[in-house]
Amino acid sequence: MTRLNIGGNKLTFATLPLATDLGITNASNYVYFPQQELIIAQSKPNVVDLSSQAKVGETETTFAWTSNGEALTNYTAANGIFTFSKSANDAKCTMTNEALPKQTLTTAAVYIIAESSAIDQVDADNSNMPVEYYNTQGIKVSGQEPGLYIRRQGNKTTKVIVK
């Protein structure tokens, strides 16, 4: 076989056969591109799993994320699994691998919705904090007399009526 063109389909790094796997020694006319965009499913709104594309044989894949033409860097990556710390619309990943130098894969657009950090989710125990009362003008008062007050204890604030 001297020429092979298998572009325009849904083959990926995980499913594309290498020229050497097919017994082709001169792969200069061995063309895989262009491939259709890779549709990916997200297990969590801020996690994208491309681990099946992380290697071709023993060669690592290079991943580049963009959103609306801007490079994304707000993620961590481990073996093709990306965890994003910021939300992004229309995020796409472009993948290249030296084992298939003429091939570039691109994902279809995904919407990244970053989860809030653990610090945002901490609900401090306010029961041991001192209680402070303020009148409706924001002046600190004792809160002993009847009236409408703002009660603050730690980081929790409530309106109270003392009768």
Image: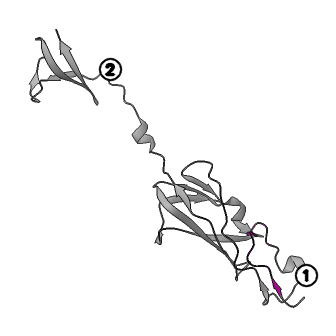
Is disc 2 surrounded by few (<14), some (14 to 19) or many (20+) residues within 10 Å? few
Which residue is labeled 2 in the image? 127
In this orientation, which residue lies closer to the viewer: 8 or 112?
8
Task: Tell me the tag on residue 102.
Answer: none
| Residue 68 place in picture, x, y as percent | 47, 68
Q: Secondary structure at mark 1?
A: loop
Give residue 149's position: percent from left, percent from top.
Answer: 16, 21
Question: What residue lies at 83% left-to-right and 80% top-to-bottom?
Answer: 19
Q: Quadrant of residue 50?
A: bottom right
User: Which of disc 2 and disc 1 is earlier in sequence?
Assistant: 1
The span picked out in magenta is 4-17
Type of colouring: one colour
Q: Nearer the viewer, residue 125 or 63?
A: 63
> Please, what is the three-letter code of the amino acid marked with disc 1?
Gly
Q: Which residue is mark 1?
A: 23
Query: Quarter-wise, where is residue 24 in the image?
Result: bottom right
**Residue in the picture at 55% in, 49% down:** 45
Query: Picture quarter containing residue 159?
Result: top left
- Asked if the magenta segment contains residue 163, the reply would be no
Neighbor class of circle 1 (other Cα within 10 Å; few <14, some 14-19, many 20+) is few
Within the magenta stretch, is there residue 13?
yes
The amino acid type found where label 2 is placed reads Ser
Placement of 33 over or under 89, stated as above or below: below
Q: Up-down: is 155 above or below 51?
A: above
Q: Tell me the quarter of the image containing the C terminus.
A: top left
Q: Position of residue 48 (x, y in %)?
A: 60, 56
Vertical order, 140 against 65 (above or below): above
Could you say which is closer to the camera, residue 120 or residue 41? Answer: 41
- Dominant SS type (magenta): loop
| Residue 109, image x, y percentages | 57, 63
| Name of the residue lying farthest toward the top | 163
Q: Nearer the viewer, mark 1 or mark 2?
A: 1
